[in-house]
Image (cartoon, rainbow, N blue to C red):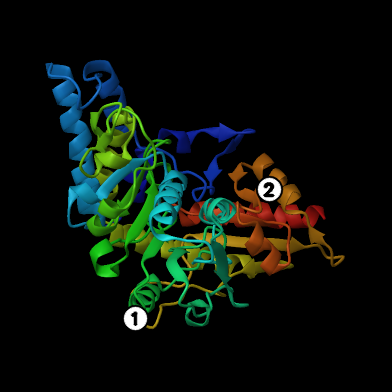
Amino acid sequence: MYKIGEIRNDFPILAREVYGKPLVYLDNAATTQKPLCVLDAMREEYLNVNANVHRGVHYLSQQATDLHEAARETVRRFIHAEKTEEIVFTRGTTESINLVASSFAEAFMKPGDEVLVTDMEHHSNIVPWQLQAQRKGIVVKHVAVNDDGTLASILPYLSERTRLVSVTHVSNVLGTVNPVKNIICQAHERGIPVLVDGAQSAPHIKVDVQELDCDFYAFSGHKMYGPTGIGVLYGKEEWLEKMPPYQGGGEMIDRVTWEKTTFERLPFKFEAGTPDYIATHGLATAIDYVSRLGMEKIAAHEQELTRYCMEQLQELPGIRIYGCPLPETTEQGKNWCHDAVVSFNVTSPQGETIHHLDVGTLLDRLGVAVRTGHHCAQPLMERLGVQGTVRASFALYNTKEEVDTFVAALRRVITMF
């Protein structure tokens, strides 16, 4: 049984008010709130186990190292990687993708080689490749988005110069759940590796990187109830071994001389400098938290909220929702095509689109926190023919009552125009 009342008690911020109204927090695709167990775990480590990891022989350093490496094992289990050596800690999804873009391009790409992304990517999966285009002369190609918010087939875009496919698992704007397993299979048939941006999927969908057979998978801690500044890059050992280090410094070296430097074994080769060992413990605690609740139960709860929200919004005048009309199952019948995100705009009775910023500002005054703007996905906004949208995004602690409050507030905003 999904005990939403007990769950909400784990997140004290949900009980606060803004502008004299109970907070309805629907900006979870930007960042999630943190349960007390995560905050307590990090505070406890700062108070009693604070010492640099891997370097010290003293007790505190050993204890901190044990917690840090236990966190790596927790991540491995969570995404079902084969080895802990395949789990690289980064500052977040952005740095994980930058790491792959830099190191993979250096090792395997020449001028004219292509990386394939999509029109629905976050800027973090566009700009790193554009930087490599400027530095190395590679070509960035992008797969089109269909009118219903689904992704077109990647097959017409693949060529003999394609060296990597880099695709989001779930769109942060549309909530589209892309068929990444099929994409990976199609790419692998042509010997092309695939990177999956899992920032919007890891908090909502049970992820098994071995079942997906992806070559790289990236996600962030702060979007799944963990601290900011910590993230993960999963990479198949065979690729990580071949790729050069992303940064240089302490922690990632084996031996340094004036003549030559040799590098540490995986995953430390990609972890230059002191890691945020407090944040890794916080991330592991967050993973343990969602694992106890059950990812399948979380997914079912959020999918029901998404469906309910979209049904309620469609009862309001002037609402245009972007993406799939309603959550539906895929051909495999396992995942929904629309998950945890609802993006929309509002047209006034006079036929004018109400600016998304105005809608978001007025909702905020009524206690409802949503996101407005281009959501770091300007190419997708251009494809949709808009400058931005209003986005409501759900988490494991949101309720139907909060959806009702949101819809009632939005109805009031519409009457203002």
Q: Residue at x 29, y 20 (%)?
A: 46
Q: Which residue is mark 2?
A: 360
Q: Residue at x 32, y 31 (%)?
A: 275
Amino acid type at image mark 2:
Gly
x, y percentage for residue 148? 59, 77
Please tell me the numbered disc located at residue 147.
none
Q: Which residue is mark 1?
A: 332
Q: In front: 193, or 398? A: 193
Q: Residue at x 34, y 58 (%)?
A: 216
* Residue sitting at the far front: 259
x, y percentage for residue 126? 55, 56
Distance between mark 1 and mark 2 Cα atoms? 36 Å
Q: Nearer the viewer, mark 1 or mark 2?
A: 1
Residue 325 placement: quadrant: bottom right
Q: Is residue 379 above or below residue 253?
A: below
From the image, which quarter does the C terminus lie in? bottom right
From the image, which quarter does the N terminus lie in? bottom left
Q: Residue at x 50, y 80 (%)?
A: 153
Reading the chain from its start, which is encountered first: label 1 or label 2?
1
* Residue sitting at the far right: 350
* Mark 2, other Cα within 10 Å: few <14 / some 14–19 / many ≥20: many
x, y percentage for residue 48? 22, 17
Q: Is residue 387 above or below residue 260?
A: below
Q: In front: 167, or 33? A: 167
Amino acid type at image mark 1:
Gln
* Mark 1, other Cα within 10 Å: few <14 / some 14–19 / many ≥20: few
**Mark 2 residue element:** helix
Q: In this rendering, does residue 283 appear at all?
A: yes
**Mark 1 residue element:** loop
Q: Is residue 14 left or right of residue 344?
A: left
x, y percentage for residue 181? 35, 73
Residue 57 placement: quadrant: top left
